[in-house]
Amino acid sequence: MTTPRKLWVHLAQVAVLIIVFGGWQLLTSLKIVDPFFFGQPSGIVSTAWNWVQHGTNFGSIWLQIWTTMEEAILGFLIGVACGIVVGVLLGQVPFLSEVLSPYIKAVNALPRIVLGALFVIILGLGMSSKVVLAAFLVFFVVFFNAYQGVREVDGNFVNNARILGASRMQVIRNVVIPSAMTWIIASLHVAFGFAVIGAIVGEVLGAQHGLGVIITDSQNNFNADGIFAGMIIIGAIALVAEWLISLLERRLLAWRPQMASEATAV
Amino acid sequence: MRSNTSPDYRIELSAVTKRFGTPGGSAFTALRDVTMTVEPGRFCAVVGPSGCGKSTTLTLVAGLDRPSEGSVRVGGRPVDGIARGTSFMFQTDALLPWKTVLGNVAMGPLFHGVPKKTAVTDAREWLRLVGLAGFENHHPHQLSGGMRKRVSLAAALINEPSVLLMDEPFGALDVQTKAIMSNELLTLWDQTQPSVIFVTHDLEEAIALADQVVVMTAAPGTVKAVFDIDLPRPRGAVQEIRFGKRFTELHHEIWESLRDEVERAYARTAASGAADVAAVPLSKEEARS
């Protein structure tokens, strides 16, 4: 349903788009801003179109996109799985969390992205080094949220389940994980962003294929349009992923009340 | 519905003391030398001023916590952790918000390894018994407070407990709903006959429901007196029997005993509270709650 107000919002949004890109195009065409350094919307579009039609220096554009996606998705899945497992484990075993907490904090304080360089040395220029870097970045985001989520579980729920006869594993499966799910899912939005960053940085540090490679290549050729085109493609991918995660969120957290809809009396 | 009037599910607390460490490092004695017995199949209500350790008593019987001294025995065996056959209804909602009503009730049997189909059939039957047929697929947040209590009751009773522990289960309900729930509880208790310890601060509720009312002292809690409630069963509507002659006599008698403790507990909180806030004195009636 589009109310008049909604319509105005959409119109204004389109106007912002036109002003920004139109202004950019105009200023660069008039040479007020140098298109060599700042690119030009028409140049970006033609660069992207050129990639689609004639491929990049490293093969077809679809191969580059798919490579980056594959690295990001694999890294994301591995990082999420490990983050949840370790988060739940540490949340459930206080001894373990007390022992490991200073180390986790220390590792978290490091600029982990730099480890990408190490992974490229260890695992080579193939996909695995990017997957590991992406997983590593994702892990910390998900881990902290899963851990916090587990710690916030209502003790009443746990006691009630235990009295009803739940074993430790049953408590984790029926109470702890569903309860922490709100926290975990909230982290997934940010986590996918980190997965993409991990994949791209990994490629920039050394790879044969991927969007990071064509961005580096554009940089080496002083091709600002190429950098922007790569950036926009990545942004589009991230938006699609964000939308998919929102679908998942709605599915998994369907039990949550939509609004404060107090139902029927006794 | 099987009735499990196991003759040996007596609840015995003897010389139970429970101390908690406080953040300041000192020890707080919640219960001191509590000795009480609930005969199998009997309904025992525990009343006392707030903070007298009524709930602590329940957690000890449930096996959620251990006494510092003394022993807690259920069915002749010392309580050593959570035991099958004990159900607990908490003061606040313990229903899992992400499970449906049916899922919440079926949890108990499923945890005990009952096949899913049987567990679901049983859960439906219990929901029918508490008057919630047709609400199986609702989530707890879609129900009213009274309905959620019925779900909790069904979830507690589906395990066919021989011991049912209730911690002010109807405390948050309005008066009318509370009366309805009390009647339903008595009907269901009559069918299954577990031994019950029912903690409440509402003396009328205690007398209307119980065979035996235990009055506890202000903290550290200990048993001050035990009253037998000789009102005939079935008792009928709680709202009506409270005007009966015997009921008022019992109420008067027990309140005499309870009043001192309530006043003492109040004087203590007022004294400690007076330092930082100008405490507004409560009337006797208000102090009861």
Image: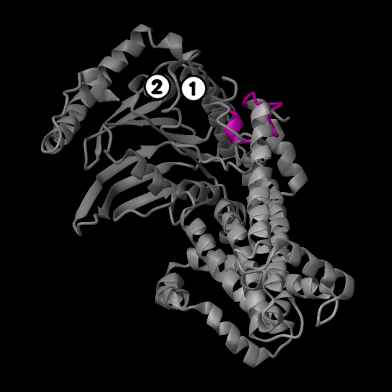
Viewport quadrant of the N terminus of chain A = top right
Residue B103 shown left or right of residue B264 in the figure: right
Whether A104 is among the magenta residues is no
Other-residue count near label 2 (Cα within 10 Å), few / some / many at <14 / 14–19 / ≥20: many
Q: Position of residue B240 (x, y in %)?
A: 44, 8
Q: Position of residue A87 (x, y in %)?
A: 53, 66
In the image, residue A39 above or below residue A26: below
Decide which of A156, A118 is in the foreground and name it.
Answer: A118
Decide which of B70, B122 is in the foreground and name it.
Answer: B122
- Quadrant of residue B206 in the image? top left
Residue A117 shown left or right of residue B232 in the figure: right
Q: Where is residue A96 in the image (x, y as percent from the top left)?
A: 45, 73
Whether B137 is among the magenta residues is yes
Look at the image and give the residue range highlighted in magenta. Answer: B130-143
Viewport quadrant of the C terminus of chain A = top right
In the image, which disc is placed on residue B182?
A: 1
Residue at x 40%, y 72% (from the top left corner): A98
Residue at x 21%, y 36% (from the top left corner): B218
Q: Position of residue A20 (x, y in %)?
A: 63, 53
Residue at x 72%, y 54% (from the top left corner): A244
Instruction: Give the Cα distance between marks 2 and 1.
Output: 8 Å
Identify the element where label 1 is drawn.
helix
Return the chain for callout 2. Answer: B
Give the overall secondary structure of the magenta segment: loop
Q: What residue type is labelled 1?
A: Ser
